[in-house]
Image (tube, coloured by chain):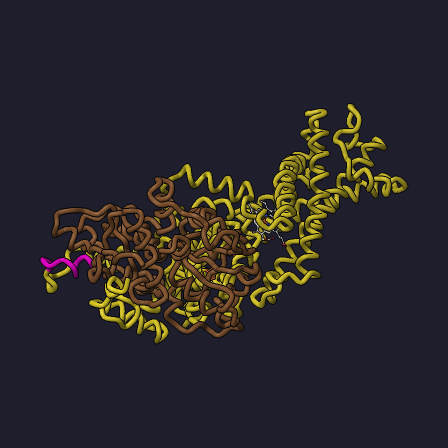
Amino acid sequence: MEYLPNILFTLALAAGVGFFVFNCRKLIRNIKLGRDENRSDNKPQRFKNMAKIALGQYKMVRRPVSGIIHVLVYLGFVIINIEVLEIIIDGIFGTHRIFSFLGSFYDFLIAVFEVFALLVLVGVIIFWIRRNLLHIRRFINKELKGWPKLDANLILYFEVVLMLLFLTMNAADLSLQLRGADHYAQASGVVGAFPVSQFIAPLFENMDTASVIMIERAAWWIHILGILVFLNYLYYSKHLHILLAFPNTYFARLKPQGEFDNLEAVTNEVKLMMDPDADPYAMPEEGSADDVPAKFGASEATDLSWAQLLNAYTCTECGRCTSECPAHQTGKKLSPRRIMMATRDRIEDIGKNIDANKGEFKEDGKQLLDDYITREELWACTTCNACVEACPVGINPLSIIMDMRQYLVMEQSAAPSDLNNAMTNIENNAAPWPFNQMDRANWINEI
Amino acid sequence: MAEAIKVPTMAEFMAQGKTPEVLFWVGCAGSFDDRAKKITKAFVKLLAKAGVEFAVLGTEESCTGDPAKRAGNEFLFQMQAVTNIEVLNGYEVKKIVTACPHCFNTIANEYPGLGGTYEVLHHTQFLKSLISEGRLTVEGGKYKGKRITFHDPCYLARANRIYEAPRDLLAKLEVELVEMKRCKTKGFCCGAGGAQMFKEPEPGNKDVNIERTEQALETKPEIIAAGCPFCNTMMTDGVKNKERESEIEVLDIAEMIAAADDL
Ligand code: HEM
Ligand code: SF4
Ligand code: SF4
């Protein structure tokens, strides 16, 4: 019986990590449903971007208030996780503060953890106030109604509870060490320094030791189980960004924002048409049927590339893109954040469909276009790249909009009629207006 | 005022067995649109004044394909691109200057993958280099001390990270440059990009160009400077919509430099 807690803990840990790994594999499978795209060039530049944008939070601080608070929460999280390592080892082996042999350095570490826990607590409360009490436009858009809003608040509640438990656990531990309780007190005196929880510890002074042990144990257990639950919550939440921000910034596009990729399949076709020696009736060469894609552009999430799907899973729903978008700011339906959220919803639905149908997608009568993203949104985009520039985690909503427009025009000839006129003009007169190409140089005689 | 300026075509250069220093890519707006043609003419006057040996393609130029590509018609874009690249490569063009950021972006970024690699400059960059080489001198003249705001064209600024060349030219004109809140990386689109120029806007509560014009008017400018013929049209329309066209001019930087010099 003595080892029961250790065994229970080890089982909980295995279950928590196991389910997380299970979901990660699903996540990776879903992302790989996207089409192939090479994002492995120029590795040094990619590492640099990841270090700067994700690790260094470079774009976050362009909005100083939310940026700096986020840096605190982010740093706090990373640093406090070092302590989680000790908690796990203590849990498995039934030890007490296994790292305390580090002596004064250990005191320093625990003190730092405590200060950060307090900062995270304050930061998260400010986040909650910004989200729920201040009318900040990017947090009250209609695409955040329902689950996204609840999700955002749940994350904050989780953090508050975890930090409070962490501090309570430390306070009870300190109280127990001070009264020389078995298992807690060490020969060397009090281990750890508790700059924050020392103010909570006096609450336990008048309790009997058994009760304080119970509080300490309860806080310890709920804290670590909470972390395991939170870990598994990520996959269902925008909080997935805490992991994906890193690969997403690594794999982000490196080309100038104005450069839109040329479709290779079209290049081949155009070359063939322009080549006077090509025989239009020639049989396609062996294997070349594979070169022509089944369709141009994207009407479904699986027509997008894996990098675009990774973008969708990484989106923090912060709305910085939407608050810079000229279409959105002038009342149009388009919101680049919604483009990312809708893409994630669709690829998730496809993944669930595959799981439900023994690994095979079963037609569900829906697609990304029209059922998740409307044409009205797509046509409102000015391709200005403001959303791409604004995104603090390196997401490119514009590329999805462009791929979907490509589908509308190339597969469905479904451009707005004015645009069709402009394109007909380009085709016939080499300019988007109905002028004769022979008049193109008339201005020369007007100087 | 000035004697007639000659604008030779590549074909004429070729006939004489010569190659010009630079090809001036005029673009559709610069060729056909009445407002944009003024920019074209102003730039040509500056080229002539600086003694640059330049040429145009004339009737051999055709749309770069930018609006087609941004509308989603990759096929039409590549047809245009390949046609243009054939002409450019036929003349062995090395260096191109254009007053249109859309043409600039397309030729500089999207043509290389289709076989057309050139050194491409926006006219503000080219003018800046002419000045620093001492081939062109600029003085404030009539713009000295005027309150001016500059609207960053998306396809020059964010898309290609060119923020300073136009501002350096404005500094040479000794203007008082007042930046809008949203400038450079945070610049706000005029509403023309992505082929929006050629279609009706989606339903909303305002047109993008009106919003941008309001942002510009907040700086209380005497002149709104632009570096793109499409932005120019959008901002001009915006100023008219606000009934401020009698006090506030919308001018391309090339026009300002030419006018400062009484060209
Ligand atoms: C690894 C630990 C991280 C933690 C614990 C963390 C925590 C959080 C929390 C609690 C929020 C919610 C804020 C709110 O409700 O407004 C948030 C939002 C956000 N996080 Fe993180 N984050 C982490 C990593 C990152 C990284 C690496 C990035 C990349 C730069 C990032 C970018 C964002 C963005 C853009 C938001 C949206 C909120 C805003 O704009 O204010 N996070 N994060
Ligand atoms: S590129 Fe399109 S979606 Fe992105 S900010 Fe500009 S108009 Fe909005
Ligand atoms: S795409 Fe980027 S900027 Fe937009 S909501 Fe998502 S994380 Fe924020």
Q: Position of residue B233 (x, y in %)?
A: 41, 66
Q: Is residue A30 left or right of residue B18?
A: right
In the rendered image, which quarter is residue B228 located in? bottom left
Q: Is residue A311 above or below residue A171?
A: below
Query: Per the image, is A275 magenta?
Result: yes
Q: Is residue A349 visible?
A: no
Q: How many marks?
A: 0
Q: Position of residue A134 (x, y in %)?
A: 69, 60
Q: Residue furthest front?
A: B1
- Figure colour of chain A: yellow
Q: Say which quadrant the C terminus of chain A sits in.
A: bottom left
In the rendered image, which quarter is residue A399 located in? bottom left
Q: Position of residue A60 (x, y in %)?
A: 57, 48
The residue depicted at 65 percent of the width and 47 percent of the height is A69
- Figure colour of chain B: brown
Q: Say which quadrant the N terminus of chain A sits in.
A: top right
Q: Nearer the viewer, residue A390 or A27?
A: A390
Query: Per the image, is B55 magenta?
Result: no
Q: Is residue A60 left or right of residue A370?
A: right
Q: Is residue B230 above or below residue A115?
A: below
Q: Nearer the viewer, residue A273 or A212?
A: A273
Q: Position of residue B159 (x, y in %)?
A: 41, 52
Q: Is residue A215 visible?
A: yes
Q: Nearer the viewer, residue A179 or A114?
A: A114
The residue depicted at 31 percent of the width and 71 percent of the height is A422
Image: magenta residue range: A270-278
Q: Is residue A365 above or below residue A325?
A: below
The residue depicted at 51 percent of the width and 41 percent of the height is A52
